[in-house]
Structure formats: structure tokens, C-alpha cells
């Protein structure tokens, strides 16, 4: 984002950003995984992670030096060489592919801006819980339909949304079908708890201006949306969540 737009958002109190909250959640999850592995007597403190719905970028990439094995899955294959930080990539539909990995494979799973696309979020959360090692962490970001702009976007007929998407997405490749089956704080918390997750921490943050920053009109609209909900946490546009599966705390 241009420095001017980011500075304006900060002056207007649209903070913290999703990137900041996500960075803190991933750092804490990695520290827990490293401590747990050390406590278990493993020689290497590095960890095994999954980016579930990895798309074309990963917030975990900047932590690559702390990761021993970095796996990405998605329903679409990336362009050759597009995700150089991954050790492995597999095509997996998270809502159905329960056999894609052995139980207890990963220390940390990131699933960023994916839940709104899941046909069956409970099935996806169950699969991710199965693939996490005991005590492992799931970190999610997704949209909050309690924000009126998000609700309107999710409620749009598909044909209309397809016409709006080019204005708010970087490219057609970023415009995926939307379901929004589990996209408010209460529904997300309940779905995670029902699949056995514990220590569910859920933060809300205004992210519309940053998400729609590429064009001035959509940036301005997003800024209005972020300011509208700034003082109403349950209605901010975006959810940043971390949750653990039962197991030894580090
Ligand atoms: C909005 S993009 C986010 C990509 C990336 N995680 C990021 O934060 O930039 C959503 C991604 O989820 C993937 N996706 C949607 N439904 C999925 C499913 N059921 N299983 C696996 N991936 C899925 C899409 O193909 C897409 O790459």
C-alpha cells in the first residue's frame, strides 16, 4: 500500500492491520511449537506447517527460516515456481479431503481468507484438527458478515458479484466463489468449539480500505466502511482467529 494511504489509515485509527495481528498470532504459534518440540527432546527446534488454501501468497513465508517442512494445499494448482517457499504442494479440497495427510502431521496450520469459500467449514475444521499434532495451533483469517458491506457483498447474486469483483480484487485469479456459511464471530467460534478446538482467540479488525486499496474510489469506500465499524468490534470487517487442538501446552 502507498505510504500515504497507510499513514492516513493509521492517523484515522484503523489499526492494527490484519498483517500485524496475523504476524503476532503466527509468531506465538511458532514459539509454542518450537518450545513443545524442544520439551519433547527433538534435536531440531523447527516445525512442520501447512498453509491450507495457500493461493498465491503466504504470511508464513517470512518465517521460512523457522520452518522445517512447509506444505501448501489448495483446490487450484499454482503457476510453476510461484510459491518458492513451499517444500510441497498438493491439490486438496479441505472440506472433503480428510485422507490427504496422516493424523498429527502439522505443528501449525494457517488458513487465510479461505473460510468464506468453504462449502462445509465444519468438515474443513475437523480435517485440520485431525492433521494438527496434539497442542498444535490453527490460525485463520476471514471476513465478518456482521459488517454491512461484507454482508451486502456476500448476499449479492453471483452474476452481480462477478461484475463488482474486478473493482476490489487484484486480478480475476483472486476472485473465488463465495459461500460465507460460517462468517460471523459467534458462528466461527461455535464451529471451532464443536470440532474440539480450545483456547479460541478471536479478534476483529477493519480491513476494507487495505483490501480495496488498489483504486482510490474503492479505497475511499473501504475507509468509510472501516470507520463506520471502528467503535463496534463485533461488526469490524475481518476476523483473525487462533485456536489450539487439545494437547500439552508449551
Ligand atoms: C482469497 S484466496 C486466499 C489465498 C491465500 N491464503 C492468501 O491469504 O492470500 C482463497 C484461497 O482458498 C482456496 N480455496 C477455496 N476453497 C477451498 C477448499 N475447499 N479447499 C482448499 N482450498 C480452497 C482458493 O482456491 C484460494 O486460493
Image (cartoon, helix red, strand yellow):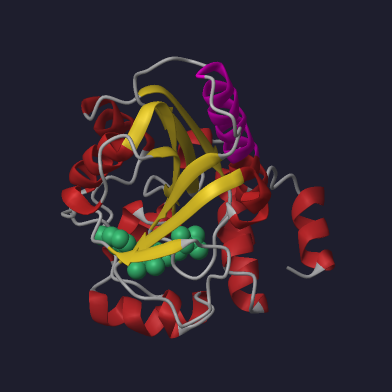
**Quarter of the image where one finds residue 222:** bottom right
Is any part of residue 75 visible from this angle?
yes
Q: Residue at x 77, y 65 (%)?
A: 5
In magenta, the rendered stretch is 24-40
Q: Which residue is drawn at 48% across and 15% down?
A: 249
Q: In this view, does 56 lie above or below 228?
A: below
User: Overall secondary structure of the magenta stretch?
Assistant: helix
Locate the N terminus by quadrant. Answer: bottom right
Q: In this view, does 219 lie above or below 143?
A: below
Between residues 82 and 161, which one lies in front from this camera angle?
82
Q: How many labels does the image show?
A: 0
**Quarter of the image where one finds residue 150:** bottom left
Q: Which residue is drawn at 23% across and 50% down?
A: 181
Locate the C terminus by quadrant. Answer: top right
Between residues 122 and 62, which one lies in front from this camera angle?
62
Q: Residue at x 42, y 30 (%)?
A: 136
Residue 111 placement (x, y as % from top left): 42, 50
Q: In this view, does 159 lie to the left or right of 234?
A: left
Between residues 41 and 137, which one lies in front from this camera angle?
41
Q: Is residue 69 left or right of residue 16?
A: left
The residue most toward the front is 43
Q: Quadrant of ligand 1?
A: bottom left
Residue 186 placement (x, y as % from top left): 33, 32
Residue 14 placement (x, y as % from top left): 69, 48
Residue 33 belongs to magenta span: yes
Residue 81 placement (x, y as % from top left): 53, 79
Q: In this view, does 53 lie to the left or right of 23?
A: left
Amino acid at each position: 500500500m502507498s505510504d500515504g494511504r497507510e499513514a492516513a489509515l493509521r492517523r484515522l485509527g484503523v489499526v492494527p492491520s490484519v498483517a500485524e495481528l496475523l504476524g503476532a498470532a503466527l509468531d506465538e504459534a511458532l514459539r509454542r511449537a518450537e518450545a513443545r518440540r524442544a520439551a519433547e527432546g527433538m534435536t531440531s527446534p523447527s516445525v512442520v506447517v501447512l498453509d491450507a488454501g495457500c493461493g498465491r501468497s503466504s504470511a508464513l513465508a517470512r518465517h521460512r527460516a523457522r520452518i522445517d517442512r512447509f506444505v501448501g494445499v489448495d483446490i487450484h494448482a499454482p503457476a510453476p515456481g510461484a510459491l518458492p517457499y513451499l517444500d510441497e504442494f498438493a491439490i486438496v479440497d479441505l472440506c472433503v479431503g480428510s485422507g490427504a495427510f496422516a493424523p498429527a502431521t502439522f505443528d501449525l496450520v494457517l488458513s487465510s481468507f479461505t473460510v468464506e469459500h468453504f462449502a462445509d467449514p465444519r468438515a474443513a475444521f475437523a480435517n485440520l484438527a485431525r492433521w494438527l499434532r496434539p497442542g498444535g495451533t490453527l490460525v485463520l483469517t476471514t471476513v465478518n458478515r456482521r459488517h454491512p458491506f461484507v454482508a451486502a457483498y456476500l448476499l449479492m447474486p453471483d452474476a452481480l458479484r462477478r461484475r463488482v469483483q474486478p473493482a476490489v480484487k487484484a486480478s480475476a485469479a483472486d476472485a473465488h466463489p463465495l459461500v460465507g456459511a460460517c462468517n460471523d464471530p459467534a458462528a466461527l467460534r461455535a464451529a471451532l468449539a464443536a470440532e474440539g478446538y480450545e483456547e479460541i482467540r478471536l479478534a476483529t479488525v477493519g480491513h476494507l480500505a487495505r483490501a480495496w486499496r488498489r483504486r482510490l474510489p474503492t479505497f475511499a469506500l473501504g475507509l468509510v466502511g472501516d470507520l463506520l465499524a471502528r467503535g463496534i468490534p463485533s461488526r469490524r470487517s475481518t476476523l483473525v482467529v487462533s485456536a489450539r487442538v487439545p494437547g500439552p501446552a508449551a
